[in-house]
Each structure stands twice: as structure tokens, then as C-alpha cells.
């Protein structure tokens, strides 16, 4: 199971740019520098090209194109020209932050790990999850007095699908947090 992360950095002029890196290259305490996730490098580059085309931003600065000088899209008038120094750095960076605001991995909103309890009244069982920095550390189901572990191989790993579920559940309704 491998994902590729779009990790933010800045070039020598201060423009936001991205590196597409495999999941084992992103430290778990730096997940807030992840702006998007893809299943492979090619999918990441395709996503960047589509965003560049849709928003008229530079595919080269986004990390979807390489080479010297302005990007090919600028020559076709499809890029606003940040790669040629034609766009203010702060204006460009604000636009990029806005474009990626819904895709990026959110900062962990708690000081420490949290425990989430969910009770399924239909099946009369309780599920308890321990989460830290969007990583599911422990999951158990209580159908009897003894808990049964649920995790297996995902334990202690960042999983983007789990992250999406957790953000919806944890950020929307914190009544079940212990």
C-alpha cells in the first residue's frame, strides 16, 4: 500500500512549489505540509496539470513540468506567468493556498491523542478508536466485556481514506470524544 504526497516547498524566488514524494518520505509530524494525495506519481502530475489548466497557474511551479525558463503553458498564454516573474509572489502564493485549501491534510486540532467512542445501538456494541495526528493508533469493538482489536496492518500508519472519514467525524461532532 503506497501513496504519493504533494508536499509544499518554496523556490528561490519565494513562489510555492510542490514535490511529489512517496509516503515513506513524509514524516508523520509534518502531515500539515501535505497538500494532496495521489495513488501514484503519474496521477499526482495529472492532477497538477489539470489544476494548472483550470486556474491558469504555472504547471512548472506546481511540479508538473521541468525545464529552464518559463513553462510551455506560458508560451501558449495558458499560464499567468509566475514562472516568468510576471505575477506577484504573495498574490500567486495566496491563489495556490486557496486552490489547495480543500485538498490539503489539515493540522491535527488537538494537543494529544484522542479517544473516540461510537455506540451502535442496533447491534448493541461499542467501538473505541484512539487517534493521534490523524493516525488510527488503536481500534477495538466491545461486544462482550473483553475488547476485540480491529486494526491489523493499518495500525500506526497514515491512511488517507481513514483521514477523510476521521476529519468528517471528528471535526463535525466532538461529543463522542473521550
Image (cartoon, rainbow, N blue to C red):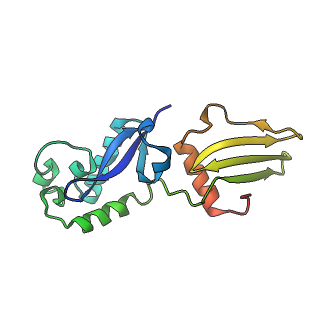
Residue farthest right in this picture:
145
Quadrant in the rendering for residue 87: bottom left
Q: Quadrant of residue 176?
A: bottom right
Seen at 84% across and 45% down, the residue is 123
Describe residue 178's horizontal placement relative to residue 46 as left or right.
right
Asked if 87 appears above or below 118 in the picture, the reply is below
- Number of callouts: 0
Instruction: From the viewer's side, name the closer residue of 135 and 52.
Output: 135
Work out which quarter of the rendered image holds the C terminus and state it. Answer: bottom right
In the displayed structure, 82 sits above or below 18; it is: below
Q: Is residue 23 above or below residue 128?
A: above
The percent coordinates of residue 36 (x first, y second) are 41, 49
Residue 158 placed where, x, y %?
A: 54, 42
Rendered residue at 55%/44% (across/down): 161
Q: Please state if 147 lies on the left or on the right of 99 as rendered.
A: right
Q: Is residue 74 above or below residue 38?
A: below
Q: What x and y, as percent, mark residue 24? A: 44, 36
Which of 119 and 6 lies nearest the eye of the viewer? Answer: 6
**Nearer to us in this view, 156 or 35:** 156
- The residue that appears at 15% across and 49% down in the rendered structure is 71
Instruction: Pinpoint residue 150: horizontal percent, then vertical percent.
Output: 72, 36
The image quadrant of residue 21 is top left
Amino acid at each position: 500500500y503506497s501513496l504519493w504526497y504533494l508536499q509544499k516547498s518554496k523556490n528561490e524566488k519565494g513562489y510555492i512549489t510542490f514535490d511529489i514524494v512517496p509516503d515513506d518520505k513524509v514524516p508523520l509530524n509534518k502531515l500539515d505540509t501535505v497538500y494532496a494525495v495521489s495513488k501514484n506519481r503519474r496521477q499526482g502530475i495529472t492532477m497538477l496539470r489539470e489544476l494548472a489548466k483550470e486556474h491558469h497557474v504555472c504547471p512548472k511551479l506546481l511540479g508538473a513540468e521541468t525545464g529552464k525558463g518559463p513553462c510551455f503553458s506560458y508560451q501558449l498564454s495558458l499560464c499567468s506567468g509566475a514562472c516568468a516573474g510576471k505575477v506577484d509572489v504573495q498574490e500567486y502564493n495566496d491563489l495556490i493556498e486557496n486552490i489547495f485549501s480543500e485538498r490539503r491534510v489539515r493540522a491535527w486540532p488537538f494537543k494529544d491523542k484522542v479517544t473516540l467512542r461510537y455506540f451502535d445501538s442496533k447491534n448493541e456494541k461499542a467501538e473505541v478508536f484512539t487517534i493521534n495526528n490523524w493516525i488510527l493508533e488503536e481500534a477495538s469493538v466491545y461486544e462482550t466485556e473483553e475488547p476485540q482489536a480491529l486494526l491489523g496492518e493499518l495500525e500506526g500508519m497514515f491512511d488517507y481514506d481513514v483521514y477523510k472519514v476521521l476529519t468528517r467525524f471528528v471535526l463535525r461532532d466532538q461529543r463522542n470524544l473521550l
